[in-house]
Image: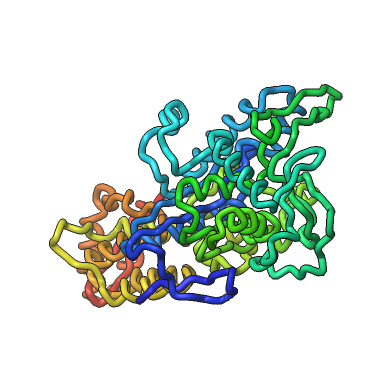
Amino acid sequence: MAIKLYNFLPKKVEEFNPINAKSVGMYTCGPTVYDYVHIGNWRTFVFEDVLKRVLRFNDFDVTHVMNITDIDDKIIKKAADEGVDYKKITEKFEEAFFDDFEKLNIESEEDAPREVRRETNMFEQYPRATESIDAMIVLIQKLLEKGVAYKGDDGIYFSVEKFPNYGKLSGLSKGNLKKGARVNADLYDKESWADFALWKFPSSPKASGGQVKKEPSWPAPFGEGRPGWHIECSAMSMKALGETFDIHAGGVDLLFPHHENEIAQSEAATGKKFVNYWMEGEHLLVEGEKMSKSLNNIYTLADISEKGFDTLALRYLFLTAHYRSKLNFTWESLQGAGNALNNLREEVASWNEVEKEAWEGLPDFEKDFKNAINNDLDMPRAVAVMWDMVKSDNPTVRKHESILVMDKVLGLGLERIKKAELPEGAKELIEKREAVRKTGDFEESDNMRGELAKMGVEVEDTPQGPKWKVKQR
């Protein structure tokens, strides 16, 4: 079955056909490293991880590039407020981001330690904006030469009016265009069009204590300054993947203005289609509300852990909703996800482990699972197929093989689960109970079940004989 994906550009599900037969170029918007990432953003990052895993499950070689925004308005303001160099902010929160990255079992593109990557600059998969300034300057220079960008009193701006297809991704009407208006801020009114900053000339922001500090800047032919947020992603993605690539993914909140602006500046510079498939993950609500500081409902992975939850329970919760549907986070729903994950772990721990080349998995279940994930990443259906397989009467060694296949996409870390060992005396008690049960003395067998429960062993009577599992403590 071919992979089908919802493409936000034509706004329909399409069969996925990459530029090159078996390789995929994929760019995703990474974190702005000025604070800890909240769980709404983590939903997007997990969706992107699942997308990459699905592509690889279908035997595609995936080059995944995710930027690190380490210079923008928020970073500069925070550095000014704290009276420190902006790198003190970005290095701290980049490190925190990748620590959390691992806690959610998101596949990393590099096996080398992050310290090595930071010191040697050896990898392209996680480019930092400040390490790609030259590429941004070249791109802005092209736009100036083509007459679609111009110099203002505080920076270089893209002229939205000179890009006829502006709005094709977000679907906004040109009636909202404010001719001649310029927006210097990285984020602005999501219902209004205006020329946006490609390059910002230096200013001196005032910190909360009144301290004035010149913001970071770099030399450029059109004037010293720093990049606007939107140009960063265009320059970094095309530098790594080429002027046209397969997939660009992010959160639906980035459709406008960020992704719209990326298309405009990239296609105006190259004259080529920028991206073939645009994929956007929906919002995460908290107790039915949008996350906001005023509601005090912005949670991080640290908040999840401090309440005693496994962070992989959050990943499991994300898998229970389609990426294009809103998901309502509650502590009760997280508890339910955690219970389901623990039950799954206990099941897998009770199964016979796969012996190399001794058994095959369960092809029918694996086929249904693949059909689900290839149908626009239908993870709720994929999770349901997984549970149908878990609860089936098939030999546990075959189920064990299939669960490991499925977990290549689910990413729940099931390959790390070791077979459970019965406490001392439990094996003999299970055998004795089965003999008693066959005599029809069910009262005594129930008493023995209670003794096993005190030992942390749960027994289920099946036509094939007693099935046991050790409860995780």
Q: Quadrant of residue 400?
A: bottom left
Q: How many marks?
A: 0
- Front in this rendered view, residue 280 or 224: 224
Q: Position of residue 254 (x, y in %)?
A: 65, 57
Q: Is residue 21 left or right of residue 263?
A: left
In the rendered image, the residue lying farthest to the right is 210
- Front in this rendered view, residue 423 or 359: 359
Q: Is residue 471 left or right of residue 270?
A: left
In the rendered image, the residue lying farthest to the left is 358
Q: Quadrant of the N terminus?
A: bottom left
**Looking at the image, can residue 323 be seen?**
yes
**Looking at the image, can residue 450 be seen?**
no
Q: Position of residue 210 (x, y in %)?
A: 86, 24
- Front in this rendered view, residue 299 or 335: 299
Q: Quadrant of residue 163?
A: bottom right
Q: Is residue 176 left or right of residue 466?
A: right
Q: Position of residue 390 (x, y in %)?
A: 34, 69
Q: Quadrant of residue 34?
A: top right
**Residue at (52% x, 76% y) in the render:** 13
